[in-house]
Image (cartoon, rainbow, N blue to C red):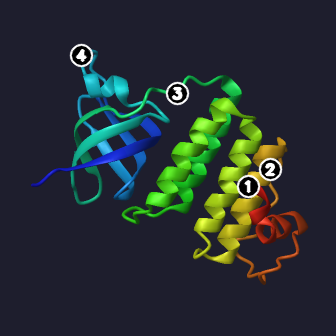
C-alpha cells in the first residue's frame, strides 16, 4: 500500500477508543480527508501532540477504504495562538468547511482561503474575518443545492449575530432561489461586497 504526502489543516480532532485519535482535515491536493492516528494518545507519541485543531501539518497518510491512516506528520507552520473568541469563530469556520465539502474533492483555492482566514482571525476582528470566509466558502461551493446554501447562510447569520434560535429553510420544503428569507438572499446576492 503506497502512502501519500500532503499539507493539511486540521478541522476536527476526536479521541477514539483508548489510544487513538480520529481527525478530519482539509488538504491542499486531496480535499477533505478523514483519518485515524493509531496510538496518538500515548504520552510519547509525537504525532499525537501535533494533532490539534487549526494546526497546519505536513502529513504522510496511507489510503484506506473508509478512513486513511496517519503514518507520520510534522509542523508546516507555527501553531496559531488564539484567544477564546478567535477559537470559537475558528471552530465555526472549520465546521462549515467540513459540512460543505465532500471527501476526495481537491480544491487548492479553498485550502489557501482557509489558511488565510485562520491567520486573519488572529490579526483582525474575528467576527468579520469569519463572516468574510464563510461567504467566500459559500461562493466557491455554489454548485451545491440552493436549500443547502440557504440553510448554511442562515446558520452563519445566527452564529455570527449570537442568536440562539436558528431559523432555516425546512429541509422538507422546496423553495425557489429567492426563498423569502431576506437576509440569506441578500447575503448570497451581495457576496462580492466582502472581497
Question: Does residue 21 sit above or below 194 in this rendering?
Answer: above
Q: Nearer the viewer, mark 3 or mark 4?
A: 3
Disc assigned to residue 158: 2
- Could you say which quadrant of the image residue 16 lies in? top left
Which is closer to the viewer, label 3 or label 1? 3
- State how far apart marks 4 and 2 are (Cα): 42 Å
- Label 3 CA crowd tier, 10 Å (few <14, some 14–19, many 20+): some
Q: Quadrant of residue 162?
A: top right
| Label whose residue precedes the other's in the sequence (3 or 2) | 3
Q: Give the residue at mark 4.
A: 44
Q: Secondary structure at mark 1?
A: helix
Disc 1 crowd rating (10 Å Cα; few below 14, some 14-19, many 20+) is: some
Q: Is residue 160 above or below residue 17?
A: below
Q: State whether residue 50 is above or below residue 194.
A: above
Residue 90 image offset from top left, x and y in percent: 61, 38
Helix, strand or loop at disc 4? loop
Disc 3 versus disc 2: nearer the observer: 3
Mark 4 / mark 2, whichever is N-terminal: 4
Q: CA distance from mark 1 to mark 2?
A: 5 Å
Classify residue 115 as left or right of residue 31. right
Residue at the spot of label 1: 155
Label 3 vs 1, first from the N-terminus: 3
Residue that numbered label 3 is attached to: 80
Pick whichever, 173 or 140, lies toward us.
Answer: 140
Looking at the image, which is closer to me, 109 or 46?
109
Amino acid at each position: 500500500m503506497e502512502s501519500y504526502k500532503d499539507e493539511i489543516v486540521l478541522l476536527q480532532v476526536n479521541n477514539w477508543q483508548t489510544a487513538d485519535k480520529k481527525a478530519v482535515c482539509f488538504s491542499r491536493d486531496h480535499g477533505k480527508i478523514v483519518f485515524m492516528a493509531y496510538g496518538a494518545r500515548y504520552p510519547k507519541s509525537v504525532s499525537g501532540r501535533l494533532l490539534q485543531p487549526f494546526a497546519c501539518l505536513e502529513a504522510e497518510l496511507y489510503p484506506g477504504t473508509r478512513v486513511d491512516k496517519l503514518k507520520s506528520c510534522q509542523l508546516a507552520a507555527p501553531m496559531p495562538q488564539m484567544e477564546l473568541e478567535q477559537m470559537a469563530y475558528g471552530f465555526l469556520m472549520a465546521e462549515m468547511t467540513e459540512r460543505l465539502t465532500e471527501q476526495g474533492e481537491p480544491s487548492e483555492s479553498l485550502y489557501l482561503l482557509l489558511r488565510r482566514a485562520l491567520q486573519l482571525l488572529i490579526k483582525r476582528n474575528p467576527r468579520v474575518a469569519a463572516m468574510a470566509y464563510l461567504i467566500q466558502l459559500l461562493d466557491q461551493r455554489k454548485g451545491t443545492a440552493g436549500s443547502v446554501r440557504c440553510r448554511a447562510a442562515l446558520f452563519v447569520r445566527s452564529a455570527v449575530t449570537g442568536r440562539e434560535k436558528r431559523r432555516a429553510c425546512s429541509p422538507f420544503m422546496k423553495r425557489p432561489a429567492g426563498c423569502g428569507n431576506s437576509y440569506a438572499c441578500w447575503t448570497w446576492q451581495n457576496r462580492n461586497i466582502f472581497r
